[in-house]
Amino acid sequence: MIRLTVDGLVKRFGQVAAVDGASLEVAPGELCAVVGPPGAGKSTLSRLLAGLETPDDGEVFFDDRMVQSTPPRERGVGVVFPDFALWPTMTVAENVAYPLAIRRVKAPERRRRLAETLSMLRIDSLAGKRPEQLSPAQAFRVALARAVVAGPDLLILDEPLDPFDSRGKAEVLAEIRTVREEVGITAILLTRSVAEALAACDRVAVMDLGRILQAGPPDDVYNGPVDAFVARFLGPTNLLQGQIDGNGAGPDGRRELVVRTPLGRLVATMPGPALAVPLPPGTPVTLSIRPETLAFGPTIPADWNRFPATIERMSFQGETRLIELRGPGDWPITAKALQSRSRALREGQSLTLSVAPEFVTLLPGRLGNA
Ligand SMILES: Nc1ncnc2c1ncn2[C@@H]1O[C@H](COP(=O)(O)OP(=O)(O)OP(=O)(O)O)[C@@H](O)[C@H]1O
């Protein structure tokens, strides 16, 4: 299993920099999702990693091996392409065996690897079928088999979730998990499906305008976004402009910041060393508070932030209820609560909202220009 390092990768098409200085690190055996809006540069990044495009600048390493100039066939990358790109005139077995054929793997070894791979993905019984006879889920398994049959160092899955509904997406992710457990491989999943990426991947990288804006474990990036784009892209959030009022230390030694906001003074806990230098009072900052981290009492822990609010509107969403409120100064706030825990709430009701300092996140990317 290799460590993937992408360093300052650039790819221009005329005036457009589709990839514009992208850097990323993926540990051996990790599944890393690259998420971003349409046009962010995800497909171009995947083509650069696979060797299907040549970068204008930057480097790609598989462990210590610099590969950005290595031809695709020698690079050791297996790709599941968008819409799976199976060859329509070949059978399933011929599609899957193709990477072995072009690498001139000897016949007995080829048969062994083909049989192993078909069996791992439970497509042995489809071996003689043509792509047009397959369901989308079967076609994905065939494309995945073709991508891993030659034992690549890196697996790239380019938008495999796109054709599926949420149940289909879960099946696709289960197949990816099977392959990772069976063969252990470093993998990149390019996707617009944020919820699935957060749930299924070891690492998530948020891409926009050709750059990786932030990468890390899903929990860290979701709860500690660097800027408003990352915060909003991963899920709904309340953004608040404020000014630093003071710096201090929390009960467990973590750094705390007191911020003046339209909702009153809020305490935010800072996780990392990014802001090791105290921020001078008056520094403009932006805070992010996820809707589901807001609590509706009745008991509020002593060290939590609290402020009054009135419920304007509620919408039932099945598992959860979305609650739109107005806080001090009529400031709009969105909260989300499990439907079973929010039955007693009513539109027009005035109450106290609270939030733990660890869920009041300062967005360091906006420091000084909020
Ligand atoms: N071959 C090309 N020639 C010219 N421009 C291109 C080419 N490939 C990509 N682009 C441009 O580069 C930018 C990034 O495109 P890319 O397809 O990599 O993004 P993406 O994140 O994969 O988008 P999507 O989710 O829609 O597939 C877009 O502005 C696109 O128009």
Image (cartoon, rainbow, N blue to C red):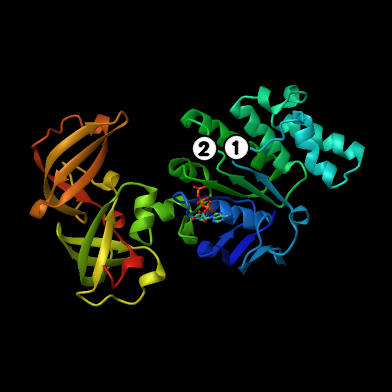
Q: Nearer the viewer, residue 124 or 278?
A: 124
Q: Secondary structure at mark 1?
A: loop
Which residue is nearer to you in this view: 135 or 352?
135
Report which quarter residue 136 is drawn in.
Answer: top right
Find disc 1 in the rendering and name its residue.
Answer: 83
Residue 69 vertical position relative to residue 313 in the rendered view, above or below? below
**Image quadrant assignment for residue 329:** bottom left
- Left or right position of 277 against 59: left
Which residue, as the protein is rendered here, is positioned at the far front? 14
Front residue of 193 and 43: 43
Q: Looking at the image, which residue is at 87% across and 44% down?
A: 105
From the viewer's perspective, is 114 left or right of 248? right
The mark found on residue 162 in the picture is 2
Task: Choose top left, top right, bottom left or bottom right for residue 119.
Answer: top right
Earlier-in-chain disc, 2 versus 1:
1
Residue 309 place in picture, x, y as percent? 12, 47
